[in-house]
Image (tube, rainbow, N blue to C red):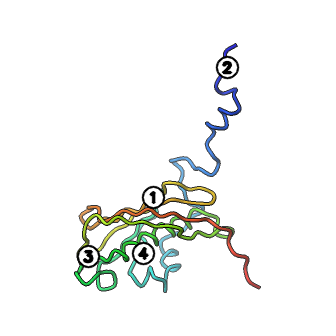
Amino acid sequence: MQKVAGSNPVFRSIMRKPTSQKSAAAPIWFDALDLDALAAMTEGTLASHLGIRFTEIGPDFLRGVMPVDERTMQPRGIMHGGASAAFAETLGSVAAWLCVDRSRKRCLGLDISVNHIRQAPAPGEVTGTARPLHIGRSTHVWEIRIENAAGALVGVSRLTIIVLAAPEPRS
């Protein structure tokens, strides 16, 4: 008797797409949020002090810009590596936050690495794009590409996020 691959429950469980994984065509975001809401949310935070602005929410990415100026440069007149790390973590953390039910979950940075590819001179602006490599129930992994105005790669970052239960509201 010939076995049909689809009749094997082990095979079916391996081939079944996890319910937490959305199709490539579907947006990854939990619900709709606009750029104005993101700007309001980050007002008075490190992101606003560094001049980070969110510019586009795509079906599977979050994009923003950051100036290379006196707030983000090192004494040599180029973007500070710590500023690029803060930019990457801001984009990746906010993107992860947009993927979860925020009434029940919160997202926190667990690990970040940044590879600096080329200098970004001041004055100027860099663009960052955060895309998920993995969106799971308890962790996310995001890749954030930072480019200069000419579209050349300035740096690439990998951010691991832990997804935790939201704290109970205080009474």
Q: Which mark is residue 124?
A: 3
**Structural distance between the alpha carbons of marks 4 and 3:** 17 Å
In the rendered view, does 156 fall on the left or right side of 110? left
Q: Nearer the viewer, mark 1 or mark 2?
A: 2
Q: Earlier in the sequence, mark 1 or mark 3?
A: 3
Cβ–Cβ under 8 Å for marks 2 and 4: no
Q: Which residue is mark 2?
A: 3
Q: Residue at x 66, y 34 (%)?
A: 12
**Where does the image place residue 7, in percent across and percent down from the top left?**
70, 26
Q: Amino acid at mark 4?
A: Ala
Q: Amino acid at mark 2?
A: Lys
Mark 3 Cα within 10 Å, few/some/many (few <14, many 20+)?
some
**Where does the image place residue 88, in percent across and percent down from the top left?**
42, 69
Q: Which residue is mark 1?
A: 131
**Structural distance between the alpha carbons of marks 1 and 3:** 24 Å
Q: Earlier in the sequence, mark 4 or mark 1?
A: 4
**Structural distance between the alpha carbons of marks 2 and 3:** 63 Å
Q: Is residue 59 visible?
A: no
Mark 4 Cα within 10 Å, few/some/many (few <14, many 20+)?
some
Q: Amino acid at mark 1?
A: Arg
- Secondary-structure class at tag 2: loop
Q: Nearer the viewer, residue 36 or 47?
A: 47
Q: Nearer the viewer, mark 4 or mark 1?
A: 4
Q: Which residue is mark 4?
A: 86
- Secondary-structure class at tag 1: strand
Q: Earlier in the sequence, mark 4 or mark 3?
A: 4
Residue 68 sits in quarter: bottom left
**Structural distance between the alpha carbons of marks 1 and 2:** 40 Å
Q: Nearer the viewer, mark 2 or mark 3?
A: 2
Q: Residue at x 25, y 84 (%)?
A: 75
Q: Nearer the viewer, residue 33 or 153?
A: 153
